[in-house]
Image (cartoon, rainbow, N blue to C red):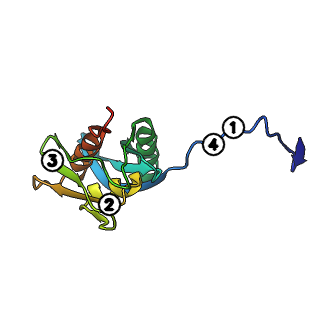
Amino acid sequence: MTETNNTIKSPALEIPAEPEFEQKVLDIARVTRVTKGGKRFTFRAAIIIGNKNGKVGFGIGKGNDVAQSVEKASKQAKKHLVSIVLKQNTIPHEVGAKINSAVVFLKPASKGSGVRAGGPMRVIAKLAGIEDISGKIISRTNNKINIAKATMAALKKLKTQHQ
């Protein structure tokens, strides 16, 4: 055992750290509630986290200030992590999903073509570590949260050849 700066390090006591996640803020909205005494403001944050190695999560948090809502959203995203099956830096097969008004369609792309998807689909694919994918938002909705939920639902449906 070695002692450095009043901390003891031992090879037997080292615990592997949780994989570090990168996070992106998808949306921050100020929500107003009108009460008898006036208006009360809260904030809603939508966060996507991923380790760029097949794990990605999505969370929504509400709080009295932006920092509090972002913290709550990142905690929820860590609780709802999804492991994605990757096949040569792309997805193994075509998949689609529908959540409320958002309909998304994902399909594998050839090597070197990059991420051809827009909005929340692009952010989720980048943070999941998918390098080559083609995605399309079939319904024209501007709701980023529903598009992100539909993309996550589509990625959950992915299966390998052996499953």
Residue sitting at x 22%, y 49%: 147
- Image spot of residue 88 (x, y percent): 38, 54
Which of 146/130 is in front?
130
Q: Which residue matches tag 4? A: 17
Residue located at (33% from left, 67% from top): 112
The crowd level at tag 3 (other Cα within 10 Å; few <14, some 14-19, many 20+) is many
Q: Tell me the quarter of the image containing the N terminus.
A: top right
Q: Which mark is residue 102?
A: 3
In space, the residues marked 2 and 4 are separated at their CA atoms by 29 Å
Which of label 3 and label 1 is nearer to you?
A: 1
Mark 2, mark 3: which one is toward the viewer?
Answer: 2
Task: Give above or below for 62 relative to 118.
Answer: above
Mark 1–mark 4 CB contact (< 8 Å) = yes
State the CA–CA distance, disc 1 to disc 2.
34 Å
The tag earlier along the polypeptide, 3 or 1, is 1
Q: Counting residues from the N terminus, which is met first, the one under dot 1 or under dot 2?
A: 1
- Residue type at mark 4 is Ala
User: Which of the marked residues, 3 or 4, is nearer the chain's N terminus?
Assistant: 4
Mark 2: secondary structure:
loop
Q: Nearer the viewer, mark 1 or mark 2?
A: 2
Q: Identify the secondary structure beneath mark 3.
A: strand
Q: Amino acid at mark 3?
A: Ala
Residue on which disc 2 sits: 132
Q: Disc 1 marks which residue?
A: 15
